[in-house]
Amino acid sequence: MQQFLKLIRWPNLVIILMTMFFTLFFVINPLLGLKSFEAGLTVTGFVLLVLATLFIAIGGYLINDFFDMDIDRINKPGKNQVGKKFPVAYVQLSFWILNILAAVMGFIVAWMADKPLYGLVFVFTSGLLWFYSERYQCMPLVGNLVVAFLSTLSFALVWLFDFFTLVNDPDDFAAVQTSFPVVNKMMLIYMGFAFVTTLIRELVKDIEDVEGDDRYGCNTFPVRFGIKATKVVSVIVLLAGLALSAWAQLFFYYAGFRVLFFWFFLIDIEFFIVMALLMKATDKLHYSTISVFIKILMLTGILSMIFVYFET
């Protein structure tokens, strides 16, 4: 069981679950002035949406480990259990089953929102994860940007399907539409935060894995342009994150979210800590430590959504 939980990256799944739960119950509903499932997504719709997202994520982790079996013998000795504790055929079959189930659930949610074609989002996401593992992760910066984009979907999908479900009820839609601008800004802030923090984490991870990637011809940004250039790009991304945080704080201050305004100073400090550690990093242990700090930064951002509920 322990090996299986590691295989599916259970801490990452918890983060996805928290993100989707907090987005609906601590951000969207309070800002729209709605009680849980009073309007918008139903219980069934939300559960199916969460399960579809989790299944796609698990499928992505499985297929990534499948394609990385050789590289991980160098980058993560003993950690990749595909082909050892978990047969390759089992992993491949699990990938297809999980993604088919996710697509079915996604189309049901889309149908419930009266936007059946939006179910294709789940098919597109599954395909993107396959191509990321098979091709994009070894293309300089392309794979990093793909993962960063996918990290925003946990926020975007909840708001997308909640919005279109509200549209189907004219009375509910008319009652809450004046609050849409503030919800949109909140979603942009958190999606931008997810994009930036995931992008910097992927760049740092590529530096960690440069030895194995180089040996097996995986042409990541550090392999192609060197660690020093990757650090420069990473610092630029961190500065973009700080700029986003500053813009968010201005919005929070003038919108009356004072606790959020001060909480984001903690996020600012964490950005500076990651930047300082990155500049001094010289070996794999240093980059592993930076990865831990980036995860703390991500969690700090997710937890900040709780304050939206209490300040609304």
Image (cartoon, helix red, strand yellow):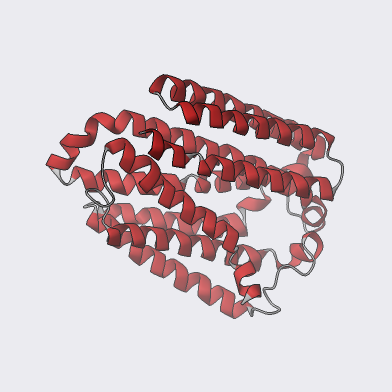
Vertical side of 221 occupied by 96: above or below: below
Seen from the viewer's position, the closer of residues 189 and 89 is 189
Q: Nearer the viewer, residue 134 or 106?
A: 106
Residue 106 appears at what percent x and percent y? Answer: 35, 60
Say which residue appears at 61% left-offset and 32% top-offset.
266
Q: Specify whether residue 140 is in view.
A: no
Tell how many labels: 0
Task: Identify the residue at the far right of this view.
Answer: 282
> Which image quarter holds the N terminus?
bottom right
Q: Is residue 78 left or right of residue 26?
A: right
Residue 100 vs residue 295: left or right? left
- Residue at point 58%, 37% (across, down): 196
Answer left or right for 74 relative to 171: right
Residue 237, how many percent across, how many down? 64, 32
- Return the residue nearer the eye: 137 or 269: 269
Image quadrant containing the C terminus: top left
Residue 288, percent from left and from top: 77, 50
**Quadrant of residue 311 within the rendered picture:** top left
Q: Quadrant of residue 7?
A: bottom right
Residue 160 relative to residue 236: left or right: left
Residue 46 to residue 149: above or below: below
The residue at 24%/58% (across/down) is 111
Instruction: Give coordinates of residue 202: x percent, y percent.
Output: 66, 46
